[in-house]
Amino acid sequence: MNRLRGLFRQLSRHVTVLVIPHTDLPLWRARFSLNFLLFAGLLWTSGTVLAGFIIGQHADYMITKADNQVMRHKMLYLASEVERSRSVLEMARATDRQMRVLLGMRDKRAIVEAEDAVGGPAAGDRMNLTRLLADNPARAPQREIRRSLEALRVESQKRVASFQEIAWHITNERSLFRATPNIWPTAGRITSYFGYRFSPMASGEVDDNEFHAGVDLANDADTPIFATADGTVRHAGWNGGYGRMVLIEHGWGYSTIYGHTSKVLVKPGERVQRGRLIAYMGTTGRSTGNHLHYEVLRHNRPVNPLPYLKRPLADDPVN
């Protein structure tokens, strides 16, 4: 108790503050009690802490506001990039359809309808999302953003798969074109057509009619003979009534036969291209004169070669 009284007594004492200027100004003196000085110190400290707290809160607000501004611009940029990517994909889809029409490929409308059933934001949804991002990025639903990005990813994968299918189709069509006979194998005139005919080796019997599996093209001896499509030589040499014969497999079920040649210029297993010189015309085997017996086989069955004689040779005197 005595200590408390002594403390109060000490706090009630006064302190004199003197300010002595170095100029002609008068001496300034102030007298304060220790109680007042203690109160003033506490008030100063409280004010300093409160001011620091207010400044800190304001600084946090400004930082948060700046972060929101940055986030809003980023989200707006993301939305614009999504829209730009979607526009590019729409162009890719239109190009896909045009290429399929030009190439005569399968109509993709059913697949497009299935694609439309997958979902994803429409144009109105994207506009609402853009307005929402411009208003407050924190309110932008991440579900909408994820759905837009997922729809773009799925659409991109489908477009890539579609263009891969188109590339595969073009490759196959090119391979089929290169494997399909479509030029005249030699220069000359047709002396015998595909189908039943009276045998040139007729003996006067009733059954002298025979099936002719190709066409005969007659010309002078040693007239050049060319491969009518790309392929691989499977036989090059003598083969009974065919005489010296060349058999070429082209793929896609096509094969061609060149018979009665005087000289063969290729070997079995050799790869040849359309227009390659492979033999010379002759009259070897079962033949009555210089000509080429030309056959086109489809899946090992002879077919009429005339529809495949589309492109005449440059030196063909008949065509």
Image (cartoon, rainbow, N blue to C red):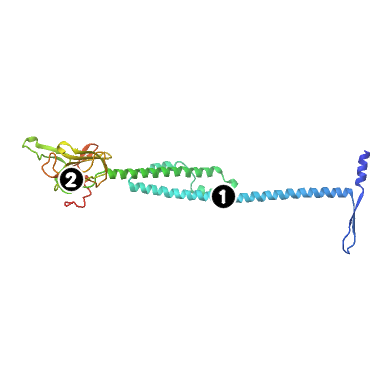
| Nearer to us in this view, 187 or 70 | 187
Q: Is residue 184 above or below residue 240?
A: below
User: Dividing the picture into quarters, in which one does residue 166 lie?
Assistant: top left
Foreground disc of the pair 1, 2: 2
Q: Is residue 194 above or below residue 316?
A: above
| Nearer to us in this view, 50 or 313 | 313
The x, y position of residue 194, in whole percent, is 16, 41
The x, y position of residue 149, in whole percent, is 50, 44
10 Å neighbourhood of mark 1: few (<14), some, or many (≥20)? some
Residue at 77% x, 48% y is 49
The x, y position of residue 135, in whole percent, is 59, 50
The reply to whether residue 185 is in sight is no
**Disc 2 on helix, strand or loop?**
strand
10 Å neighbourhood of mark 2: few (<14), some, or many (≥20)? many
Q: CA distance from mark 1 to mark 2?
A: 75 Å
Count of numbered circles on the image: 2
In the image: residue 203, left or right of residue 178: left
Residue denoted by label 1: 74
- Identify the amino acid type marked 2: Tyr
Q: Residue furthest left?
A: 204
For residue 263, which numbered disc appears in the image? none
- Identify the amino acid type marked 1: Lys
The x, y position of residue 242, in whole percent, is 16, 39
Residue at 40% x, 42% y is 111
Q: Earlier in the sequence, mark 1 or mark 2?
A: 1
Residue denoted by label 2: 280
Q: Looking at the rendering, in which quadrant would you find the N terminus? A: top right
In the image: residue 148, left or right of residue 276: right
